[in-house]
Structure formats: C-alpha cells, structure tokens
Image (spheres, coloured by chain):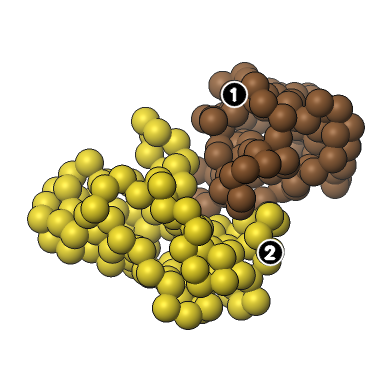
Chain colours: A yellow, B brown
Amino acid sequence: DAGVIQSPRHEVTEMGQEVTLRCKPISGHNSLFWYRQTMMRGLELLIYFNNNVPIDDSGMPEDRFSAKMPNASFSTLKIQPSEPRDSAVYFCASSLFERGGYTFGSGTRLTVV
Amino acid sequence: QQPVQSPQAVILREGEDAVINCSSSKALYSVHWYRQKHGEAPVFLMILLKGGEQKGHDKISASFNEKKQQSSLYLTASQLSYSGTYFCGTENETSGSRLTFGEGTQLTVNP
C-alpha cells in the first residue's frame, strides 16, 4: 500500500492567494483527518470525516478554511484567502475504523509570504 | 482537553531506559502513542483502550492505568533510532474519533 498521499509536499504562496491541499487516504480506511502542526500550537485537529461525511469541523480556524471529501479516495483542504499566520505543516491522516490508529501522510509544508 | 505530557525533553545514552507520561484530568476512552522524527510525519506506535492494559512490541511498551487517566510509554535499552518526538493522543467518551495530542516529548539518544 502506498500509504496516505498528500500533495503538494511544499507550497509557497503570497498572502491573499488561494491554496488547495490534497489528500488520498489509504484504500478501505473510512475516517480521514486534517491536522495542522506548528511550533507554537503543536498538532491541532482541523476537521475529520467519517465515511466521507464531515463529523467535526470545530477546529477549522475561520471561514477562510474549507474542506471537502467528495468520495472515499480524495479530500481537499482549501484556504482562501491565505495569510502568513496560516504557515504550518498540514497533515492528512486516515484510519481503518472510527477509533483506530492513524496513518499520517507526509504532510504539506505551507509558507505564506 | 489537551493531555499533559512529561518530561518535555530527555537525553539518553544508547542502552538507557526512559519513561514518558501522559495524563488527563478526566477519564479517557483511549490513548494513542506516536513517534515523529524531524521533518517526517508522526508514526503510530500503539493504542490502549482498557484500564490496566499493558502492551508493547520489541523494547517499546505502554500502560494505561485503572482509572484511564494516565498512560506511560516505556523505552527499554534505547537505540539511536528511538530519537524523535513522542506524542500521546487521547480520546474521551464524547470526542468521537477526535484525537487531542499532547505537546510532545523530545527524546534524544546519543551514542
């Protein structure tokens, strides 16, 4: 299995631009999670999906952030407009069942200048 | 509610043992342990679900106390490859699948 696949690995963008992060979970995993990691705040859950349905988006910082999971094999996290404080590593993770161990993707390092 | 990890950092010589603790003020549904090396993604180590549970593989094991409020990760006869940041992630009865991670414990194993 190729694991959880995220793209791009690195993204540098200017403030105000739209950014889209992509994630392909492990086939057969029915839970998908988006986390953000920074030195100051550690690993923060942004949103999670179970069977493609958003269950908890209380961690999404504000309306500039949105996430979708149109099917079991693809999810996106969009930031529009981006701000310098959004700079972080964004991880996608999936798990086989709702309360199982997570497999993390390699992450997307986002820099907003 | 974020679990509290201790210590924040530990430095060992190869072959020494370490214990990392993770505690919560409320009873938990489960505790996960992950290791993250610099510049890489966190990697799942194990999950504990039952009060009083102990489990492990190789020389890394963990326990979950009877009240399900504290977990400890034990690293025995440490190897250079054990270096990294260890995170516990916790779920409570009402959090669903949502894991809340501790701040992490940075472990450095020197030759």
Q: Is residue A91 left or right of residue B86?
A: left
> Dot 2 falls on which chain?
A
Q: For the residue marked with disc 1, what is the amino acid?
A: Val
Q: Nearer the viewer, residue B26 or A9?
A: B26
Checking the image for residue A40, the label placed there is none
Residues behind callouts 2 and 1 on a single chain: no
Picture coordinates of residue B65, whole percent (x, y) = 83, 27
> Looking at the image, which residue is at 65% across and 39% down?
B92
Picture coordinates of residue A21, whole percent (x, y) = 33, 65
Looking at the picture, does residue A57 appear above or below residue B60?
below
Viewport quadrant of the N terminus of chain B = top right
Q: Nearer the viewer, residue A74 or B73?
A: A74
Q: Which residue is mark 2?
A: A97
Picture coordinates of residue B47, whole percent (x, y) = 75, 46
Viewport quadrant of the C terminus of chain B = top right
Name the secondary structure under disc 2: loop
Looking at the picture, does residue A77 appear above or below residue B69?
below
Q: Nearer the viewer, residue B67 or A100?
A: B67
Name the secondary structure under disc 1: strand
Looking at the picture, does residue B66 appear above or below residue A80?
above
Q: Nearer the viewer, residue A2 or A67?
A: A67
Between the residue at mark 2 and the residue at mark 1, the CA separation in whole angstroms equals: 26 Å
> Looking at the image, which residue is at 51% across and 78% down?
A73
Looking at the picture, does residue B78 appear above or below residue A63?
above
Q: Which residue is mark 1?
A: B4
Picture coordinates of residue A46, whole percent (x, y) = 41, 50
